[in-house]
């Protein structure tokens, strides 16, 4: 597997937690960290905006990219959610063994529909 570290912003801790749980249930991520205290400045629809947000650091893999994006789009409140992948050049061997093993397990996406 080719590791991906995916950056996703969310509007609140509650939304970030919901996204993290959905990604884990679908096995589109092996781990999600939520970082609070983020202040974002950006352009949206020709207007400069500022917002408090949560940053999700999602550990995934290139092979799970489409599924990860689908899960985020289904559960995210934003019209255009930030989903940006960074490809790490190096990941400690034991940690990556765990990371990739979790992504290979069967997801329980059906439990998300209820």
Image (cartoon, grey):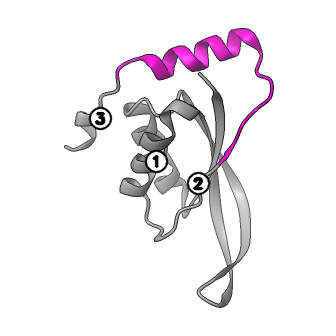
Question: Observer-nearest residue: 17 or 93?
Answer: 93
Q: Is residue 101 above or below residue 85?
A: above
Q: Left of 46 or right of it: where is 89?
A: right
Kindly report which numbered mark, 3 or 1, lies closer to the viewer in this rendering: 3
Give the residue at mark 3. 109
Closer to the eye: label 1 or 2: 2
Question: How far across and down, in percent of the image, does residue 40 sit?
Answer: 72, 69
Name which of mark 1 and mark 2 comes first in the sequence: 1
Check disc 2 and report the residue beneath it. 83
Quadrant of the rendered structure where residue 44 is? bottom right
Picture disc at residue 19: 1
Q: Which residues are magenta?
A: 85-106
Q: Residue, x 29% and y 35% (percent of image)?
A: 109
Outermost residue to the left: 114
Mark 2 crowdedness (10 Å alpha carbons): few <14, some 14-19, many ≥20: some
Q: Is residue 101 shown in magenta? A: yes
């Amino acid at each position: 597997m080719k590791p991906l570290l995916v950056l996703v912003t969310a509007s609140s801790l509650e939304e970030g937690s919901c996204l993290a749980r959905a990604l884990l249930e679908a096995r589109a991520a092996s781990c999600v960290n939520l970082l609070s205290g983020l202040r974002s400045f950006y352009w949206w629809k020709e207007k400069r905006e500022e917002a408090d947000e949560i940053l999700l650091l999602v550990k995934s893999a290139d092979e799970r990219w489409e599924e990860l994006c689908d899960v985020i789009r289904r559960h995210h409140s934003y019209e255009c959610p930030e989903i940006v992948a960074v490809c790490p050049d190096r990941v400690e061997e034991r940690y990556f063994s765990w990371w990739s093993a979790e992504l290979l397990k069967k997801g329980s996406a059906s439990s998300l529909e209820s």
